[in-house]
Image (cartoon, grey):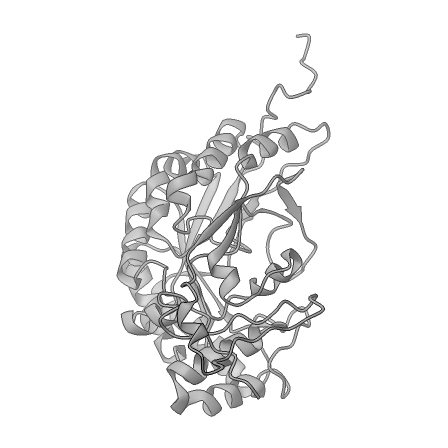
């Protein structure tokens, strides 16, 4: 079998080690050295941005595993390059690879704020908290250029609409002023995802995400701005970062986090092979052990998509993780879970304009 891995020089600063064809493609292509040095001439995977013009921006879901029924994704793909990202398979819908394409060929939705304002103004819209950061990190590096989150938050604040955000980026502090005002009104919560306190491990797993100490600094900064902040220990990878569970929770609590959650590593569709390739390259000595423990929590499989089990797993090891998390959150005074129930919906005022009929009085 041909080696599907991309040369390390071409993928420097990226998470995935290969760029397999999407599952909907009729052909599968693999680069290999034919002896003529043709691979040496190929360029590195530079970030490419494509403008996308969707008709709507709010995405609905009915999953019982998450505490929200609507979300916003201002981008497709994510430059952070997390090798384990469960959203990677969505790039196959664009005819692209869930591997290196996912983190280098990005899509931006510049009309996100305008579309949101229009959808919030539709007659009969029922206000519920909207989640941002579900399928792509809204504060990934290209947000510095496009500032879509700033525009989206301005719309939500103006309408008094509640929002929850999950991110790995310290860039969220740029919007601490808006989030602080919304937090004071019970309209905003932010969770920082912290995978490891080991900078080297974090760098290899999430090459373009903020360093662990910067994420903790973001928790502290948001807390000082009056924003309710939580920490997500995600993903928990057995035999790789699971030993850090308590230390991450302690560091986040010391920085001001009020809530905490964790998610077991998920490997749906193409993510399974992408993560295993990464693991074999970076931690070959732990490869069998990690997969053995993971499969012990998935009934012998790499992944189990059943609701109620996909986030936590089954069996003794999964039970031990849950009990460790519960004991640590009790000791630290952290509220377990990502609760959105406390966010207010009674302050919502539909936006005017864009086709909405004005009131006579």
Which quarter shows the N terminus? bottom right
Nearer to me, 27 or 257: 27
Nearer to me, 345 or 271: 271
Report if residue 106 is visible in the image.
yes
Nearer to me, 56 or 236: 56
Q: Point out residue 194 in the picture as x, y percentages from the top left corner.
A: 38, 64
- Corner quadrant of residue 307: bottom right
Q: Point out residue 298 in the picture as x, y percentages from the top left corner.
A: 61, 82
Nearer to me, 335 or 215: 215
How many numbered markers are drawn? 0
Q: Is residue 255 above or below residue 360?
A: below
Which quarter shows the C terminus? top right
Left or right? Give the position of 309 relative to 142. right
Q: Residue at x 56, y 62 (%)?
A: 87
Q: Is residue 352 above or below residue 269?
A: above
Report if residue 337 is visible in the image.
no
- Corner quadrant of residue 360: top right
Q: Point out residue 97 in the picture as x, y percentages from the top left corner.
A: 57, 65
Left or right? Give the position of 324 relative to 265. left
- Corner quadrant of residue 252: bottom left
Q: Residue at x 35, y 71 (%)?
A: 9
Q: Is residue 276 above or below residue 24?
A: below
Q: Residue furthest top?
A: 361
Q: Is residue 100 above or below residue 175?
A: below
Q: Point out residue 175 in the picture as x, y percentages from the top left corner.
A: 37, 39
């Amino acid at each position: 079998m041909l080696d599907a891995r991309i040369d390390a020089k071409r993928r420097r600063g990226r998470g995935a080690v290969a760029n397999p064809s999407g599952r909907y493609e009729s052909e599968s292509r693999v680069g290999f050295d034919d002896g003529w040095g043709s691979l040496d001439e190929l360029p590195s995977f530079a970030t490419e941005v494509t403008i996308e013009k969707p008709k709507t921006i709010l995405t609905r879901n009915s999953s019982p595993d998450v505490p929200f029924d609507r979300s916003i994704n201002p981008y497709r793909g994510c430059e952070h390059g997390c090798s384990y990202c469960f959203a990677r398979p969505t790039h196959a819908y664009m005819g692209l690879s869930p591997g290196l394409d996912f983190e280098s060929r990005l899509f931006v939705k510049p009309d996100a704020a305008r579309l949101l304002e229009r959808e919030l103004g539709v007659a009969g819209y029922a206000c519920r908290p909207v989640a941002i950061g579900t399928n792509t990190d809204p504060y990934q590096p290209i947000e510095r250029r496009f500032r879509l989150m700033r525009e989206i938050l301005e719309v939500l604040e103006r309408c008094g609409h509640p929002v929850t955000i999950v991110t790995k980026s310290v860039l969220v502090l740029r919007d601490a002023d808006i989030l602080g005002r919304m937090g004071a009104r019970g309209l905003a919560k932010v969770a920082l995802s912290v995978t490891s306190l080991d900078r080297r491990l974090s760098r290899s797993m999430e090459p373009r995400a903020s360093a662990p100490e910067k994420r903790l600094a973001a928790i502290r900064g948001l807390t000082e701005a009056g924003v309710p902040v939580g920490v997500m220990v995600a993903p928990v990878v057995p035999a790789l970062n699971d030993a850090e569970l308590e230390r991450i929770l302690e560091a986040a609590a010391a920085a001001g986090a009020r809530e905490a959650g964790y998610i077991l590593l998920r490997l749906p569709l193409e993510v399974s092979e992408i993560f295993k390739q990464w693991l074999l390259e970076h931690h070959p000595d732990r490869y069998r052990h990690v997969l053995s423990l993971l499969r012990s929590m998935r009934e012998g499989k790499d992944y189990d998509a059943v609701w109620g089990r996909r986030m936590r797993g089954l069996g003794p090891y999964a039970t031990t993780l849950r009990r460790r998390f519960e004991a640590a959150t009790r000791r630290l005074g952290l509220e377990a879970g990502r609760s959105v129930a406390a966010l207010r919906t009674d302050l919502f005022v539909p936006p005017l304009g864009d086709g909405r009929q004005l009131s006579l009085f």
